[in-house]
Amino acid sequence: MKYTQLGRTGLKVSRLVLGTMNFGPQTDEADSHTIMDAALGAGINFFDTANAYGWGNNKGRTEEIIGSWFAQGGGRRDKVVLGTKGYANMAGDGEPPWPNHDKLSALNIRRSVEASLRRLGTDHIDVYQFHHVDRSTPFEEIWQAVDVLVRQGKILYAGSSNFAGWHIARANETARRLGSYGLVSEQCLYNLAERRAEMEVIPSAQEYGLGVIPWSPLHGGLLGGALRKEREGSGAGRTASGRASDELAKPEVRARVQAYEDLLGKHGLEPGEAALAWLLTRPGVTGPIVGPRTADQLASALRAVELELSEEVLAGLDEIFPGPGASPEAFAW
């Protein structure tokens, strides 16, 4: 496994981030433990989760599965850089949301952190991430709450997810004014087929020293060999996420995906592995989040770390999936 610094921090993290969103809804506890064992054994030390994972009436279940894995001992917790998130209302399906039980008020940040610590069975969270921007809470209040939790030793760093570039700037300028450390990472939607983060989010992250952690690196399965699997009858077209299925229904997208698979086939490359390897070449990227449902899927993702894409392949990928460029040049006539 290869490692890098998380943004401007001294924290060393693996170039792949283990995403756990499938633990509970898609993968049972025993298999989730097997995947985490395999990930740690392969050198992945950055695990990502969220308080809402488990979904519906089982929100929090994913954190509980991670907590039961930590409880097995063997130095698991000490080896893992643990990231979780807060923002979502934790009411189950059909339950009315209760005031102050969501978003990023100081009250809910404190409540959410305490609840995550209990489910995870740990005394601290290494990277506590805001799962969404809260437009109704000033960053002054957010950093006051974060600084209290840092002083208490309950969180070490703060990160963001799904922030716009100007949110990153405002958050860290406010932190600078208050003497807080500010955001150290941003999780954003970023992959070959969805490169809008290159316009403002990634430049903002680089300017303020945030590590970029792409989520959905295969764009819901679109970049994982979907058309080949469809032809082979493995059901990729039926099992892909809603976003990927909607995209494949568009003739122009289908043509690009076919060109992508043809290019990689010409060079003997697996689509999913190549899509991850491409992200590892991108400026500012710490590592993509991979969310395996099985140990085999994890093994495939691990091969991407050692995969070096040739200049010819990189140029071909840019031609098929051109990026928008940074702002304001991206808007030039």
Image (cartoon, rainbow, N blue to C red):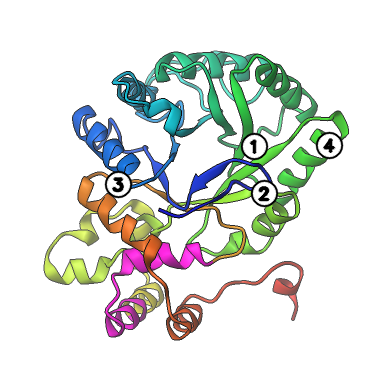
Given contact means CB atoms under 8 Å apart, are the residues at marks 3 and 1 in contact?
A: no
Q: CA distance from mark 3 to mark 1?
A: 27 Å
Residue 267 found in image quarter: bottom left
Q: Quadrant of the C terminus?
A: bottom right
Q: CA distance from mark 1 to mark 2?
A: 8 Å
Q: Nearer the viewer, residue 306 or 143?
A: 306
Report the magenta residues as a range: 259-281
| Residue at the disc numbered 2 | 164
Spot occupied by residue 148 in the image (x, y as percentages of width and height): 71, 16
Q: Nearer the viewer, residue 32 or 108?
A: 32
Q: CA distance from mark 4 to mark 2?
A: 19 Å
Q: Mark 2: which amino acid? A: Ala
Q: Between tags 4 and 2, which lies in front?
A: 4
Image-based side of 11 in relation to 313, left or right: right
Q: Is residue 300 visible?
A: yes
Q: Mark 1: which amino acid? A: Val
Vertical comparison of 256 with 29: above or below: below
Total numbered circles: 4
Given contact means CB atoms under 8 Å apart, are the residues at marks 3 and 4 in contact?
A: no
Q: Secondary structure at mark 1?
A: loop
Return the disc, 4 or 1, that comes first in the chain's sequence.
1
Return the disc, 3 or 1, that comes first in the chain's sequence.
1
| Residue at the disc numbered 1 | 133
Q: Secondary structure at mark 4?
A: helix
Q: CA distance from mark 4 to mark 1?
A: 19 Å
Q: Secondary structure at mark 3?
A: loop
